Amino acid sequence: MFNDPVDVIPSVGDKTKEQLEMLNITKVGDLLFHFPFRYDFFELKPLKEINHEEVATIQGEVASEPNLSFFGRKKSRLTCTIQVGVVAIKAVFFNQAFLKDKLIRGETVTLTGKWDMHRLQLTVQQLHPKSFQEDNTIQPVYHSKGNLSTKQIKKLVKYALKSSLEDVYEMLPESYLKEYKLPSRQLAVQELHQPSSKTALKHAKRRFIYEELFIFQLKMQWIKEHNKKASYGLPKEYDKSKIETFITQLSFQLTNSQSRALNEILSDLKSNYRMNRLLQGDVGSGKTVVAAIALYATYLAGQQGALMVPTEILAEQHEQSLRELFGDLLQIELLTGSVKGKKREERLERISSGEVDIVVGTHALIQDDTLFKELGLVIVDEQHRFGVNQRKTLRDKGLNPDVLFMTATPIPRTLSITTFGDMDVSIIDEMPKGRQPIETYWVKENMIERVHQFLIKETDAGHQAYVIAPLIEESDKLDIQNAVDVFEELQSTLPPSISVGLMHGRLSAQEKDEVMREFAANNIQILVSTTVVEVGVNVPNATVMVIYDAERFGLAQLHQLRGRVGRGKHQSYCILLADPKGETGKERMRVMTETNDGFTLSEHDLQIRGPGDFFGKKQSGLPEFKVANIVDDYRALEVARRDAVDVISNNRLSTDTDYRYLKELIENDPKIKERIFD
């Protein structure tokens, strides 16, 4: 029965079958793993143990004839007296007139509702069936689609449990069940659908939380191990003393964090397998110089390096930074969509001949006609802005080049070991010495005139400012500021001597670059923009970041926007214009004003928003768990990861028959193939 189509169940017709398919239920066995998303607890309580305004379940005898009255349009109020022990209480049912005939004087009823201890009144939400005492007091609630109700799904699950539970096989080795005191898979499935007690339900959840996280971590570690074995290549033989000399000649000292990350990267370059590492660090923490030294080591080993970034202006800034660092020591070339005609042909020739040591570019780097003589290191900045295939295409330009991904979005550890579990991760978690913290203020919208005065003061001092608005144009649905309105408001309010620019996502890439060049050249003093300035732009003269409707942004995004200022020698400021109505918005504003640490903020953001929204829906890379939650189940995630590392490093999947089902699961997963090196 387990693998039979779901319509073998007598009550499942074509319509029900379609609706079940929308829930990814096509076989009888799928019903067993369509777990409830929550449970209603109907535990009977004595009145004296129920708190005021608590939703509780009570049992008593109907002591009076029910009284039904109507008010308003189609609204009703049904009341009757219920004798609960020695206390007579009033039960009130709103808009449930149909229950009048079910409240029979002298009969025992079970009711769930909100308790008013001052009036001795229960506002009833549910009248339970007479069989309540035989029923389980823990009721599962299922996700459903179309006209399918929880009641119908419950009935179908009951059928599946009766016919197919014995076909559920154990995936975890017996040693894990004993060590962690986990119930068997069959028992856990049974308890999740038909809990016998709160304790049994807790252990069933615990079992599947561990199983889901363990299987996911096994996949990550398997990919990691496979990629290491599949990526043997020549280790890079570079002169370590030359690198040390280069570092001592820098105009600044590397932080301990930078040195640690650099040593991890250099160690990878010297090893005989291909690097697959993520370098994450806060805005301004100095990732670029670490990447530059890695490129220098590649050059010393006689190979070329490529740095791919998402925008042309960012590519130009990286090229400029590398030229300032290396001078005439290395041949550096820029390759973007704007480089065309003969100039492009000449650059491509120099790259393919090996005359160019480092190529900085955008998507132009992955065009078919871009060829390298010997590509040894690929660095992808703001890696989440590129698709898997784009990153793979650049990697394939060389013979097993080392790959370093970089991100300026501080990622909480829980997300780091799930989303990037198949990679090595280096973290720069301290700021360079002498960098002034950005002063952050939360102000209400009624203080906008003072904000305007502050903008005038800063521009009079020769500085520049960003002003961020959430939308491009006015929306009837959302009462929030928009870029066009703010642009027009500032133009009419500020002195004519202050040049105000406008940038948003509807401009072409060329138009955006042009606006940013004007801003970088200080031809625009105040740039009104949507969040398109969030990543990578470097204008050291910008000292103020004003964010309208700041409560509408997540903490990670607010922090990224704040990181656009504070890049020069002058004190910088971030002003959050916000009137949050809810506690979540107020908490965000408070946290932003209290810390500049991106990693601390990212942990707060994860707690507030949850893992699904942290990266955004398009680029989350997060697995979908049925029972586990990587925020709440952080400790289980760590245990699962430790166990997975042990299994893969000791090759238990291939040598121990207890792991045969896990081995099959991993080897037959099509998603794994997307993440492994050929």
Image: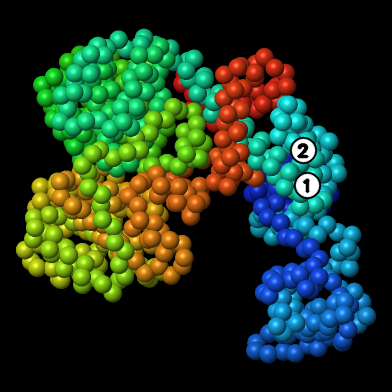
Q: Name the quadrant containing residue 293.
A: top left
Point 65% across, 45% down: residue? 627
Residue 560 position (above or below residue 310) = below
Q: Is 674 in front, or is 117? A: 117
Residue 177 located left or right of residue 220? right
Question: Which residue sits furthest left?
Answer: 497
Q: Amino acid at mark 1?
A: Ala
Counting residues from the start of the chain, the first of labels 2 and 1 encountered is 2
Q: Are marks 2 and 1 in contact (CB under 8 Å)?
A: yes
Label 2 residue SS:
loop
Quadrant including the N terminus: top right
- Residue 127: x and y in percent read 80, 72
Q: Amino acid at mark 2?
A: Pro
Q: Is 141 in front, or is 153? A: 141
Q: Is 354 in front, or is 571? A: 571
Q: Which mark is residue 200?
A: 1
- Residue 167: x and y in percent read 81, 34
Residue that mark 2 sits on: 183
Residue 223 position (above or below residue 449) = above
